[in-house]
Image (cartoon, helix red, strand yellow):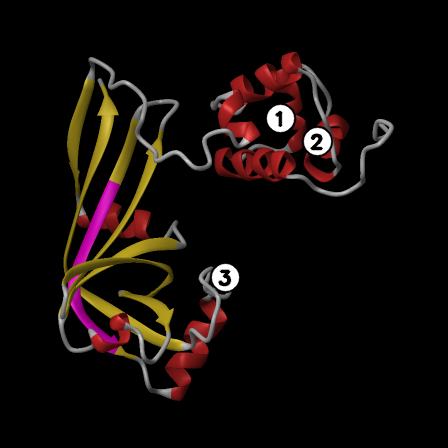
Amino acid sequence: MAPRPGQEAGRTDLGRRIAARRGELGLTREQLGTRCGTDASYIRYLEERAANPGAGSLVRLADALGTTVAELAGATTEQPPGRGVARRDSGLVALDEAECRRLLSTHGVGRVAIFTPEGPGVFPVNYVVAGDEIAFRTSGEALLARAAGTEVAFEVDHIDDVMRQGWSVVAVGEAVGVTDGQAIRRLDALARSLPWAGGHRTHWMSISPVRITGRRVGHE
């Protein structure tokens, strides 16, 4: 399908969201096309071109991806997660350590909680899991770097507004600055990207958890 008059070729935010959600669900383009009554070539077009699908197509796509039109269109980008009304059959379930570690390994952004001279602080970071350690980059002069040698908490979570469910994992341990050259090269190789915050953030910190806990909100 060719772009409509006035459209530019190139991927859009809508296309990126479709591709990302499809990836989360582990669907091929063929499988997604079958779910919403179209073919793989149209899914590819939506993901890779400056597409402008109609309202009906968006509704079918959102249903097939288990999300909402607002989520696909980016209307909720600036809204905090968890605005949906709780379901009556919701319940809280504790996660064992093995499940917590599995969930930790699936994410790339978490939050580090430390004590600062001004009081407690929480900082979002891009992170990697290397063996039993959680590692992230910051600048050598940042508050996070100065937290070396202190006990910190690291938290990661996932919220599904559509299903009104989610989970949270918290790891507690001592923060340590990574100085060994081989260890730094290993972490650089594991990192999926540079820190989103930009700047000169090349100082690796690691946390070796001594306690990991997690909870999941689900439905009976």
Residue 17 in the image, given as x and y percentages of width and height: 57, 36
Query: Quarter-wise, where is residue 151 in the image?
Result: bottom left
Q: CA distance from mark 1 to mark 2?
A: 15 Å
* Left/right of residue 49 with respect to residue 122 in the rendered view: right
Determine crowd level at label 1: few under 14, some 14-19, many 20+ residues with C-alpha closer than 10 A.
Answer: some
Q: Is residue 174 magenta?
A: yes
Residue drawn at (29%, 33%), measured in percent from left and top? 166
* Left/right of residue 50 with respect to residue 171 in the rendered view: right
Which span is picked out in magenta? 168-176
Residue 217 in the image, given as x and y percentages of width and height: 22, 29
**Eye-nearest disc, 3 or 2:** 2
Q: Is residue 171 magenta?
A: yes
Q: Amino acid at mark 2?
A: Leu
In which quadrant of the rendered image does the N terminus lie? top right
Residue 145 in the image, given as x and y percentages of width and height: 27, 76
Q: Are marks 3 and 2 in contact (CB under 8 Å)?
A: no
Determine crowd level at label 3: few under 14, some 14-19, many 20+ residues with C-alpha closer than 10 A.
Answer: few
**Eye-nearest disc, 1 or 2:** 2
Query: Quarter-wise, where is residue 110 in the image?
Result: bottom left
Earlier along the polypeptide chain: callout 3 or callout 2? Answer: 2
Q: Amino acid at mark 1?
A: Gln
Residue at which label 1 appears: 31
Residue at which label 2 appears: 46
Q: Amino acid at mark 3?
A: Arg
